[in-house]
Image (cartoon, coloured by chain):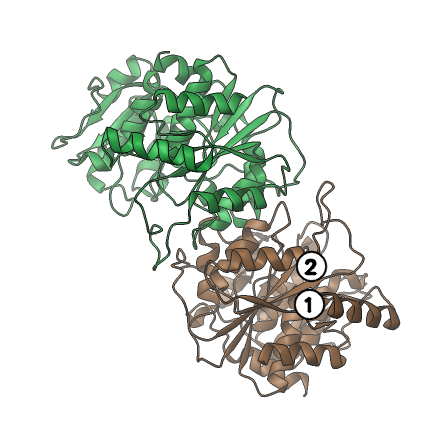
Chain colours: A brown, B green
Amino acid sequence: MSRSGVVTALRRDTDLTGNGDHALPQPYLLFLGDTVEAGFAKTAFGLRDWAGDMCVGEYALPGARVSTGLPPLTPAEAQQKGARALVIGVANTGGVIPPHWVSALVEALEAGLDIISGMHAKLGDLPGLASTADRLGRRLIDVRTPPPGIKVATGAKRSGKRLLTVGTDCALGKKYTALSIVRGLQTRGVDADFRATGQTGIMIAGGGIPMDAVVADFVAGAAEMLSPDAAPDHWDIIEGQGSLFHPAYAGVTLGLLHGSQPDLFVVCHEPGRTDMLGTAGYKLPSIEEVIERTVAMGRLTNPAIRCVGISLNTSALSSAEAEAVIAETTARLALPAADPVRGGKSFDRLLDACLA
Amino acid sequence: MSRSGVVTALRRDTDLTGNGDHALPQPYLLFLGDTVEAGFAKTAFGLRDWAGDMCVGEYALPGARVSTGLPPLTPAEAQQKGARALVIGVANTGGVIPPHWVSALVEALEAGLDIISGMHAKLGDLPGLASTADRLGRRLIDVRTPPPGIKVATGAKRSGKRLLTVGTDCALGKKYTALSIVRGLQTRGVDADFRATGQTGIMIAGGGIPMDAVVADFVAGAAEMLSPDAAPDHWDIIEGQGSLFHPAYAGVTLGLLHGSQPDLFVVCHEPGRTDMLGTAGYKLPSIEEVIERTVAMGRLTNPAIRCVGISLNTSALSSAEAEAVIAETTARLALPAADPVRGGKSFDRLLDACLA
């Protein structure tokens, strides 16, 4: 199946907040600034890989040494090709937008594009940008800002089917796993949507809610809003956040788990990682512990919750090592394990299990 | 021991945020508006009961039919008696400040008092109030607004001892239990502070962090900030929030549990309550389930965590019924159970257990 087919499906229901105003303007022009290291352009690469037919091209400043391989276009050229927004596709340490990018952003506004950012710094705080956008009737969209109107969770059961990706830690593949499962299910003709909970996921899906930025009392309510009532055979595949075993983020993880009411969950893990990200001496839990704890806690809002499989991030391993750890994990847990990025038969078996 | 002795101690360390600017201005003048039902004046009664020597008097508008029993004073008279702030001691449905209260608030500013509010509506949004405060150099303090500078939790172990109150549900006595334990420990000469996590508690303590208003990623970090490193024999008694079994608020409860790193916890419960507050058909967990789950989750940041006793809210029961349920709970769980509001020998045994 082509990427574009999937992407169209991902965008099919972008009105995730029940309010059409919060669907992101697409297609995108990907802005790379003057970035020299590919590691800082993860957002641009993620959009290319998962929302390729929504990206008309890229726009880089002199000095940039990173490319997505998409056609280089000025904002005016991109607008001619149908782009509706320039997306800041790069991050830097600190999440700030440097002053020498501003003239390019103004150029985009003047070419008729909105601007979308996932940086910590707000677009409206950049000197002159808000007034220019106002004057031209263009939007400055910070995807880290949650939509208005989020309510406290009710815990009421919703129709449709849901799968949540959870993790032994942060930043080990929960978004890519969810996207891969959506793609896989859609390839099989299953009615499935990706539900984004982080900035890059939101840009890919064209909508979603940045869970980590929601006020604490409303996290479960935001998760309820994110995957509303749906047809009985419809699947929402929800991007997980954090880990129930992370001393800083477990509360967000739990609110997302409770509000999502998942029928199934996939545990995401990176073989070889031993320490929790950004903490003082916290060791990773075992996959078994994550399964047990997720069932124990998730049962509150969905008594039928169960683990359907394991997603292993084997990007640091050779092909043979990856195969070995996938086989070992599958045998040990009696659950299908796979690396969705590698795909293959093991991932097919994980998809089989989702639909069984 | 007199209330005033306790209250002074409660205020001893008001700089909960590491920044003296966030200690609330005390003493208070309690504002009752034109409230006619005592149920809406809970904040004023709580302040009278737990911060009595910080309340110089009350100020009511014509038509009010509620009194704390404190001397009626105008803002000017209160200022003469040392008051530094007028506290809005009443709430109404919706948490809004009615327009006909504004002239009294302006009068307080002109008399030299700051204004403190725990309502949902922000003081600065009331017509004319912000400009008057600016002109007079007075502060408008919304205690539902978290302090700036909250960081992501590190999970690093802190010195000193900590006790957290947890609950089978919301709104059944976690704040009163924490306050009672602080008072009881101080009566025994123990160095103990009350750590407030909700609006009324913050007004009583003169500082604290409104956990439910913190952005989700920072809840555990806020809890770490709230009970900083302390002397080895110092006790922080931390006001709990929500319940690990509440489908809307469990995430906040978990973040507070992880950041607080409690050595001990007290489970608060209201005998006879069967349904979780504000949910669709969620039943209360048993005290046993709350103990098991709190230990399982709390062990992450403090492996030595244990339940030290049970606080029963028996306000709806007769004295004989209360004694019976306290005795039954003590026997069933092999842990001291008590109603701190009733006090007595059972509560003494709970305090004994805290210090054992």
Q: Which residue does the numbered mark 1 point to in the structure image?
A: A310
Q: Please tell me which of labels 1 and 2 falls first in the chain.
A: 2
Q: Residue B93's x, y, as percent?
A: 25, 46
Q: Which residue does the numbered mark 2 point to in the structure image?
A: A287
Q: Residue A221's x, y, as percent?
A: 44, 58
Q: Is residue B149 visible?
A: no
Q: Are marks 1 and 2 in contact (CB under 8 Å)?
A: yes
Residue type, label 1: Ile
Position above or below: B230 against A215 = above
Residue lying at 41% horizontally and 39% vertically, measured from the top left: B144
Q: Quadrant of the N terminus of chain B?
A: top left
Q: Quadrant of the C terminus of chain B?
A: top right
Q: Residue furthest left?
A: B63
Position above or below: A352 against A321 = below
Instruction: Say what secondary structure mark 1 lies in.
Output: strand
Residue type, label 2: Ile
Residue lying at 22% horizontally and 32% vertically, measured from the top left: B318
Identify the image quadrant of residue B226. top right
Position above or below: A353 against A240 = below
Front one among B25 and B153:
B153
Question: Alpha carbon of mark 1 to alpha carbon of mark 2: how far?
Answer: 8 Å
Q: Residues within 10 Å of mark 1 (few under 14, many from 20)?
A: many
Chain of the residue on which disc 2 is drawn: A
Q: Residue A227's x, y, as percent?
A: 48, 69
Q: Residues within 10 Å of mark 2 (few under 14, many from 20)?
A: some
Identify the image quadrant of residue A254. bottom right
Q: Is residue A328 visible?
A: yes
